[in-house]
Image (cartoon, rainbow, N blue to C red):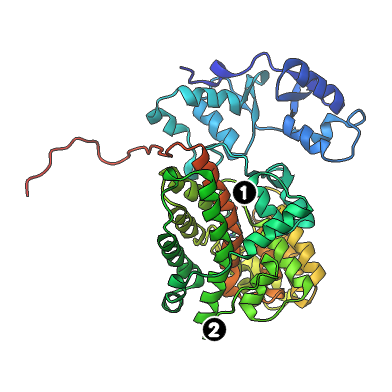
Amino acid sequence: MATAVQDLMSSPPVTCPVDATLTEATALMNDRQIGSVVVTDRRAIVGILTERDLLRAAATRIDPRNESVRRWMTADPDVLGLGDEVGAAWSGLTHHHYRHLPVVDHGDLVGVVSLRDLLTVAQIRPADEAGTDVPRGLEGVVVAETSVGDVRGREGFFHYRQYSAVDLAARRSLEDVWQLLFDGALPDRTGAAGFAEEVASLRGIPEGLTGQLPSLAAMGTPLDGLRTAISILGAERGWRPTLDIDHAALRSQALHLCAVVPTILTALFRLRNGKDPVDPRDDLSYAANYLWMLTGEEAPATHVRAIEQYLVLTIDHGFNASTFAARVIASTGADLAAATVGAIGALSGPLHGGAPSRALDMLDAIGTPERAEAWIRRAVTRGDRIMGFGHRVYKTDDPRSVFLRDVAREIGGELFDFAQQVEQTTVEVLAELKPGRQLYTNVEFFAGVVMHSCGIPREMFTPTFASSRTIGWAAHIMEQADDNRLIRPAARYVGPPPPQPVPAV
Ligand SMILES: CC(C)(COP(=O)(O)OP(=O)(O)OC[C@H]1O[C@@H](n2cnc3c(N)ncnc32)[C@H](O)[C@@H]1OP(=O)(O)O)[C@@H](O)C(=O)NCCC(=O)NCCS
């Protein structure tokens, strides 16, 4: 079994000169059937060019025949030593989200190791040894296959099925994207109208649950109440284990679930604030109806569209913690309600979906643009996290934040101007005090601004996120159920060595 980098690297490495064009580099990669080339200047390694770089380049309008490799490569890549352990190679690749690393021996380039090489080794290792290679928090570890969507952190790109999520938010309704996630294709005009009508008819809360809402509302936040409400819903509707039902039955349950979640959340919010729930209307779109049920008034079209775009952007986002939780529970064959309740629990944590209002709280605390720099500087120096900045996967602009910044700009107002000033100051201060960490605004920063500007109270920020994410969870639960294998990983035991004699009482 291979334990050192030299046992699994590809050698000799394929190189290309730094002044080569992208067309020449692509031809080289095609010829050799490889996913990267090491870029050299005379004999020195100056960069690495991968398929991912070529994809980034292809997404622009450049002419690859005139474009130099130098512009698109990753400059000064990390390198591995010939004798490095596989574990070091694994953390080098996964920690920085690299796919390929050059291998050197006494300063000379001798090979390339790819993530694929390492996965080959990981698959043939016994579980107790493979554990040594898994980074804490499973960062970068592939645990399933999905065709729902994915996130490419280094490129600042995410997609639902084959479409850019940002393009979908710009061009399609939430209902269209919901159908894309559930059925795998975007509807045409007739299909879209039919689906929107079908889901609008499912918004009512079943009677058995309605009576329980006041006590749920009194007990905790709308998100807390939603967990219990979904458990009641599943029991009342007789939702059976996913293991025992077919795709059509599960899809039908999932449509009911996603349609009724906004009604439950807004009812809980209103009851908690001493108001009667507002009945859903089936003549309004998902987003318009959401704002209607929240406030009891028809919202302006600009607000409806802004919230719809926010909801589209938050439907799904790779294998985030709540989606993973939903799939783990679904993999046991448990019912849709059980998997969704588990996902809501994961989402509620401040490190996941539980903190979108904190960015606005921070703006309140800063107060005025002149105070921003000193405030941020003090907070970072003290070791505090600046809310709405930084991301586990994105090491460049979060595309959701870029989009929502534009949405917020269109709505306008003082809060947007102030938020933008604070954003600029924060990025500058973080670059100075946390150099190399690549900290930019994440989805939370402008999401809070957009929701606030559209009249959504802070208490409802995370529930609004949960509402659209339920659609993503449901799509993943269906995918898991369609091709299921129990998700049951292993842990490394690090306690006192067993077996020890059991002391008598
Ligand atoms: C989102 C988040 C949890 C991702 O964390 P992560 O990938 O695990 O990153 P780490 O915790 O390893 O942080 C890496 C470095 O950047 C710093 N950093 C990360 N986010 C930061 C932030 N928002 N403000 C200040 N410093 C930050 C850390 O202090 C750490 O610095 P160090 O190397 O000196 O210790 C983190 O960026 C964060 O806490 N952001 C603020 C909360 C937030 O906006 N949450 C919503 C997420 S969508």
Is residue 502 left or right of 475 when viewed as pictured?
A: left
Tell me if residue 7 comes above or below residue 488 in the rendering. above
Q: Answer yes or no: is residue 133 visible.
A: yes
The residue positioned 62% from the left and 49% from the top of the image is: 182
Q: Secondary structure at mark 2?
A: loop
Image vertical order of residue 382 relative to residue 455, above or below? above
Mark 1 Cβ inside 8 Å of ligand 1: no
Measured from the top left, where is residue 269 in percent x and y?
54, 76
**Residue 124 placement (x, y as % from top left):** 46, 22
Would you say 2 lies left or right of 190 here?
left
Name the amino acid, label 2.
Asp
Looking at the rendering, which quadrant does residue 299 occupy? bottom right
Which is more N-terminal, label 2 or label 1?
A: 1
Cα–Cα span, label 1 and label 2: 33 Å
Q: Nearer the viewer, residue 167 or 33?
A: 167
Residue tagged 1: 182
498 relative to 98 in the view: left or right:
left
Q: Is residue 436 visible?
A: no
Which residue is tagged 2? 276
319 or 216: which is nearer to us?
216
